[in-house]
Amino acid sequence: MVNIDEKIAGLRAAAENGDPEAARELGRLLSLTLTDPQEPGEGEPEWPEERWLRAAVQARPDDVEALMLLAGRLAAQSSSWENYWEMNPDEMAAEGKDESTISRMWAEVSDLHTRILAAGPPPHAVPGLERLGELVDVHAESVAEAAYSFYALQDDAQSGSVLNILIVVATDLDELRWACDQWLALTDGGIGQLTVRTYVDGDETSQVDLDEHLDGARVAWDAVPVPELTGTLLPAGLPVPGPSHSGLWHYGVTVEVG
């Protein structure tokens, strides 16, 4: 099993010395967790990847991978703020944010989407980019099927009429395990029902109840039957359709309240 913490430490050192590839990869890994493990804070969503992805794009403006990651994570952040505004407008206003904040973020996503298309994305990324384009009202003549392979970790808990949901979408099993461990450490064992689903070319092929494998605030991963992915992996940063009630899922971590 890859030691993700050690990998992040090495990437951080290189990124701080100006390596744009390290900054991009560090941003990608940090997009799988709510907070920077080095500075976990209070466990509230902090979008720790944004700083590094912006550095990567600034150093290499035509780096398609970095552009897709930044666009995708800003889209995830915008969707989260929209959800927050609907549920808690007064609290959002107290943080100095309002609907104009969300509009500016979506405008940046739209600009990044245009830059990605101009830079020439790989063919397998086109369906996901069309999903991203739908979010910013850029409609293709025919939207391709986004039949990607990925893992989806979900933790949800009902509190009265409110449903709190965490979703982590990833394509590497070691990274998914790390992201799950980070979440369980932040929440002292999770908030509710913890599951991991496997999708192959857009179809759900397995679902595992991780609550059955919890050992304190950690998952006993050796006993968890999560299959390896086959098919076309979801490009980092791009969205995919979730279950019918979930709309779009974003690569990385998102938190929703419904």
Image (tube, rainbow, N blue to C red):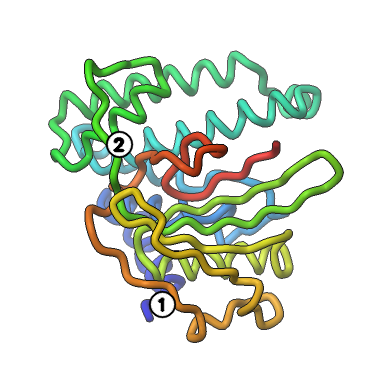
Image-based side of 214 in relation to 243, left or right: right
Mark 1: secondary structure? loop
* Residue 74 coordinates in the image, percent (x, y): 46, 33
User: Three-letter amino acid code at disc 2?
Assistant: Gly
Residue 79 against residue 27 in the figure, above or below: above
* Residue 175 coordinates in the image, percent (x, y): 42, 66
Mark 2: secondary structure? helix
* Residue 94 coordinates in the image, percent (x, y): 78, 26
Image-based side of 101 in relation to 204, left or right: right
Q: In the depicted view, which residue is nearer to us: 76 or 211?
A: 211
Closer to viewer: mark 2 or mark 1: 2
Q: Which residue is mark 2?
A: 128
Residue 145 against residue 12 in the figure, above or below: above
* Residue 179 coordinates in the image, percent (x, y): 51, 63
Q: Identify which residue is drawn at 61% across, 51% down.
A: 166
Determine which quarter of the picture holds residue 97. top right
The residue lying furthest to the bottom in this view is 222
Image-based side of 248 in relation to 89, left or right: left
How far is disc 2 from disc 1 in space, using C-alphas? 29 Å
Q: Which mark is residue 3?
A: 1
Q: If the image is split into quadrants, where does the C terminus sit?
A: top right
Q: Identify which residue is drawn at 64% across, 58% down.
A: 40
Q: Identify which residue is drawn at 18% across, 42% down.
A: 124
Residue 253 against residue 62 in the figure, above or below: below
Asked if one can make out residue 17 in the rendered structure from this viewpoint, the answer is no
Asked if one can make out residue 38 in the rendered structure from this viewpoint, the answer is yes
Q: Residues within 10 Å of mark 1 (few under 14, many from 20)?
A: few
User: Three-letter amino acid code at disc 1?
Assistant: Asn
Determine which quarter of the picture holds residue 241. top left
Image-based side of 221 in relation to 10, left or right: right
In the rendered picture of this protein, how many numbered marks are placed on residues?
2
